[in-house]
Amino acid sequence: MLTRMNDSNSQSVSSLMQALGVQAKNASAHMASASAATKKNALLKLATLLRSNVDSLQASNAKDINRANAAGLSAPMVDRLKLSAAVIETVAQGCEQLAAMPDIIGEIIGMKQQPSGIRVGQMRVPIGVFGMIYESRPNVTIEAASLAIKSGNACILRGGSEAIESNQALAGLVRQALLESGLPEDAVQLVPTTDRAAVSALITMPEYVDVIIPRGGKGLIERVSSEAKVPVIKHLDGNCHVYVDDPCDIAMAVKIADNAKTQKYSPCNAAEGLLVAQGVAETFLPQIAAIYASKGVEMRCNSAAASIITACDAIKKLANSSKLVIAATEQDWYEEYLAPIVSIKVVVDLDEAIAHINKYSSHHTDAIITRDHMHAQRFLREVDSASVMVNASTRFADGFEYGLGAEIGISTDKFHARGPVGIEGLTSLKYIVLGEGEIRT
């Protein structure tokens, strides 16, 4: 269960969250009717404000980083917390990318004439108010806010206590951009308390909040999913795989397997499992193992993979080879490491690879490296994941990289939204009927 406060404090937080809910609901009506030009202007203003406030944003972020290091937070957690100039530029570009995209609110699809004479179709409309609960990454504040603006929604954001200074600084810029564009500043509200009672309140306010999007550790998402009284868009973890097929371009496979695992260890789209067809294992594994070893990546292998890797010269020369190449357990196939650790398994063929992925993966993102078109098509059809890739790194599973401008999160659910959740994932369709005096007989 989520942590409760004492009665007086709990009542105070409850009143605060009720006030945020009322303000968000009121703001959502204005956002739903805002013109495309007004929303575009707000996003461009936000991008400008982000770029002109890099120094002050990093000063706020430094307070969070120092506090995180003093508290002994793990290296992946601290890495997620960093608000570098590159991260700020990326979210600013995301705002501009969203601003340049067509406005889909009010879009009418599927209009058809019925025998009765009426015409029936669907119109895309904002969801209304979404609540966002997230940990560590302060850039999520801008991604959520910019998507709320573009999709005509209001949002209530509750970031982690470890990023409170960064999130407050970013949210201040968002509210400034809204005001200067003639939109209600309460369209984007950051919960001002780090007390976990605020989470309990936020996820149990169906009268104000239409959907909850948790983005963080598995524990947080499990708690939110079990206690929420409103719909939840979620993914629990990111156990992603790269499958090296037979036949494949070995050089390409090495490059992608390296990038998918080591380009950054902490994101949910980093590869945690490497599957290798036995027909290419003798050629491929020594090459990728040498790279992983040089970067200090621990390899947890099945017996076939371990036999090949430990026999290669690059590994034999390492004094710590016994610590880098170890036997995988059954649990390793399920694991999301978020660290320099990878599970490696030699499989017989494509059939075994697909079966392994569908059994052990978190259905987030999985990739095949292959020269066989039919194998690629089977992988795309049969792997049951939110993103399935051919000859590309799993690190591309991201709203910005997919051209969505930004993402609110990645969903492994199978209804409403799946994969990176962008503008469309924050909208709904309602039926519209156009008539000329028809009555039902």
Image: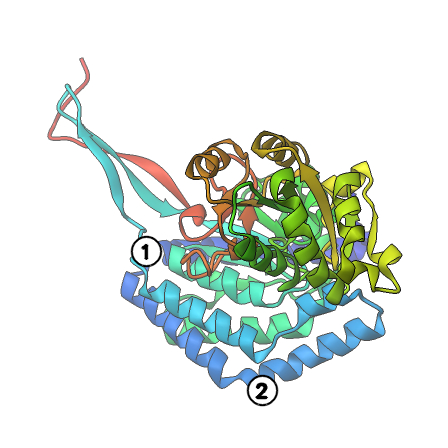
Report if the CB atoms under discs 1 and 2 are less than 8 Å apart. Answer: no
Amino acid marked by disc 1: Ser
**Label tally:** 2
Secondary structure at numbered mark 1: loop
- Residue 201 horizontal side relative to residue 38, left or right: right
> Which of marks 2 and 1 precedes in the sequence?
1
> On the rendered image, what quadrant is the N terminus found in?
top right
How many residues crowd around disc 1 within 10 Å: few (fewer than 14), some, or many (20 or more)?
Answer: some
Residue 312 or 168: which is nearer the viewer?
312
Q: Mark 1 points at which residue?
A: 33
Which label sits in the foreground, 1 or 2?
2
Instruction: Residue at 78%, 71% (x, y): give it.
Output: 68
- What percent of the width, then of the height, locates residue 269? 60, 53
Q: Which mark is residue 23?
A: none
Relative to 428, does residue 16 appear above or below in the rendering?
below
Residue 135 or 8: which is nearer the viewer?
135
Q: Name the residue under label 2.
A: 55
